[in-house]
Image (cartoon, helix red, strand yellow):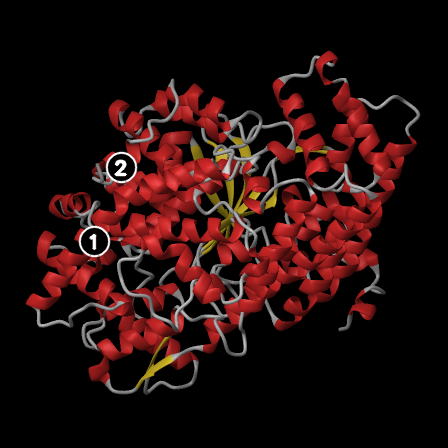
Amino acid sequence: MDSQANDTLDTGANPLIVPSPLQDQAVPFDRIEVAHYLPALDHAIAEAKGRIEEILANPAAPDFENTIVALEQAGQEVDRVSSVFYNQLSAKTSDELQALAADFGARSANFSSDVSLDPRVFARVKAVWDRRDSLGLSGEKARLLDDTYSGFVRNGALLSDNEKGELRSIDERLAKLTPDFQHNVLKATNAFTLWIEDEADLAGLPEGAVKAAKLAAEERDRAEAWVFTLDAPSYVPFMTYADRRELREQLWRAFNARAFGGEFDNQPLVKEIAALRFQRAKLLGYPTHAAFVLEKRMAETPAAVGAFLDRLLTASKPAAERDLADIQAHAKSLGGPEPLQPWDVGYYSEKLKQHRFDFDEEALRPYFPLQQVINGVFEHCRRLYGLVFRPSEAYPVWHPDVKAYEVYDEAEDRYVGLFYADFFPRASKRNGAWMTTYRDQGLYRDGIKRPHVAIVCNFTKPTADRPSLLSYDEVRTFFHEMGHALHGLLSRCTYRSLGGTNVYWDFVELPSQIFENWVQEKDGLDLFAKHYRTGEPMPADLVQKIRDSARFMAGWQSLRQTSFAMLDMAWHDGDPTAIGSVPEFERAATARAQVLPPIPEANTSSGFSHIFGGGYAAGYYSYKWAEVLDADAFELFREKGLFDPETAKSFKENVLERGGTEHPMELYKRFRGREPDPDALLRRDGLM
């Protein structure tokens, strides 16, 4: 159905317009069609504009309630429609949905510009801001006022009319390009398949990976073969275990050249997105996009991020070079190639790990059946934060694989929120894992509402004769995303723009990354790591091997993440408008972090969804920044006890419940009693 037909749909039949009849007004996914999105967005924008006109027509002097809070609530329907649309675009996309993305993005960007560039609206906000010292506002109210005022300024309120027009066109263009970038990555990912017809080519692969490849082939009507894809549950085991080097190379090259040249080439988009961000920052008075972004981060300046990354590089690179030398020596002892290439590193590092620790990661899978891990994650949430998760069939979901849970505070039997879990890969879902929100916790026009959150993953699927058995990395990923979900679910803020995960981006990874620590501890694993056939708990020696191997390749992994962060900053802390060749620029940006010779046909930027399709532009460093926070914070849990109720209560009340209501350093200090120790991460990784 074309957009003209979309715009004439009966609004009364549109489930994105009428109030949801479901419990807690949950999203009626079973009733939403592609044709509903644009009319719902237009309707929501019209309502929001009407409410803004009411604010402007108010004869009373501008104050916190009639201006700042009223603006916070004016666009709540726009936010609802947008959250459903963009979440479905990532988790259950289609050609029809992708075709709408540009129009949807342009309309929502236009609305945002209409509000932020309206001098009448800004005049009211500024009138309240100018009297801020005499208003006696509480901490959270003061924070909302500050965020609202700075939000207008950072979106062009102080610009001339000509400059506002330029900013508007930049924002409209960016709203189209970022979904296009994501779409190209997804299309390129789905376009590649590695078909295997000779069983000998499967040598070295674990049984689970072989069965999954057979199942995937059967689903494609080729039951006599096996198929491997660029989705993580297929790609990672192949690169780690497959003996056939030329096939590993083929898969590696395909993965690392996604959207780099060919039909779905992202290179022009990368350059245009970076250039537009730079132009936008200059227009607003900032030297670079990174300077603009970091003004609202714990790090504060590009120089601080640069110093942080330099410190990591200094510690990581020599360790990574030692890691590579160890792998090369072990590969040589096995008759392997010299020198190693990128498609050899995962394979021979696993061989070295097995040799050094008598430890095969695949030996862990039988102890991690998905349902048991789900139960274990929920039990951690109960012991630490008093939460219980009750599965419910009362809520429609966007795919049969998705499960819905009502979350309650166990002690008070108080409803906390709605939680969705979407675990398995499919062609309509982008790669990776993420937590997202369908409704933020906070104040709406009809009162304070509890959050609706989801985690979306790409875990190993079940086969005909065995359940989904997770890798150890997948278990860590589950805990990571659940940490984000807890940040959203436990929010107890007044204003939704300050609630849950609406915090500085170099703080947002603390709740997720700290939660990963429990799966390296015996007391944590004992809660759920039991063999799926025998029910036997994971043996103590296997748990110890997990701990012993925790620092294995720590230098390599740290250098890899540091390299990504350096690339991100290179794109965003300079003038990208003169960049000619994307691969040449990338090689120069990451040269100091390279320990293997570059492969000309590979490119990170063209598939770097975090920074060109997501919200991590000039922010990828925040993963390592938050690792410092999580390493330092977890030392307190280690000291007091993994499930110490007082420590958990303090983390819950000072971090998880408070969202962005205060500066994150103040929240952290209240929990830890001091600022974070910057050496905590290097200590944990054995890099100092």
369 horizontally vs 280: left or right? left
Q: Is residue 499 above or below residue 596?
A: above
Which circle marks residue 321 in the picture?
1
User: In percent of the image, x 59 and y 51: which residue is there?
Assistant: 395
Q: Position of residue 548 (x, y in %)?
A: 15, 44
| Left or right for 70, reference 268 | right
Q: Which residue lies at the image location 22% right of the left edge and 40% below the top edge?
A: 687
Q: Amino acid at mark 2?
A: Leu
Number of dots carrying numbers:
2
* Quarter of the image where the C terminus is located: top left
Q: Position of residue 307 (x, y in %)?
A: 39, 37
Q: Is residue 514 visible?
A: yes
Quarter occupied by residue 226: bottom left
Query: With 156 as the anchor, is 211 left or right in this view?
Result: left
Quick one: SS at disc 1? helix
667 versus 394 height, above or below: above
For the point 10% across and 62% down, which residue is it? 330
Judge whether residue 462 can be spotted in this image: no
Q: Would you call the spot at circle 1 few (<14 residues within 10 Å), some (14-19), or many (20 or more)?
A: some
Q: Are marks 2 and 1 in contact (CB under 8 Å)?
A: no
How far apart are the two marked residues, 2 and 1, measured between alpha carbons? Answer: 16 Å
Between marks 2 and 1 in the image, the one whose residue lies nearer the viewer: 1
Looking at the rendering, in which quadrant would you find the N terminus? bottom right
**Residue 344 % position (x, y):** 23, 68
The image shows residue 188, relative to residue 411, as above or below, that is: below
Question: Which one is in front, 603 or 373?
Answer: 603
Please report the residue visible at 9 percent of the width from the left and 58 percent of the height from the top. 355
Residue at which label 2 appears: 682
Instruction: Determine whether the residue tagged by mark 2 lies in a helix, strand or loop.
Output: helix
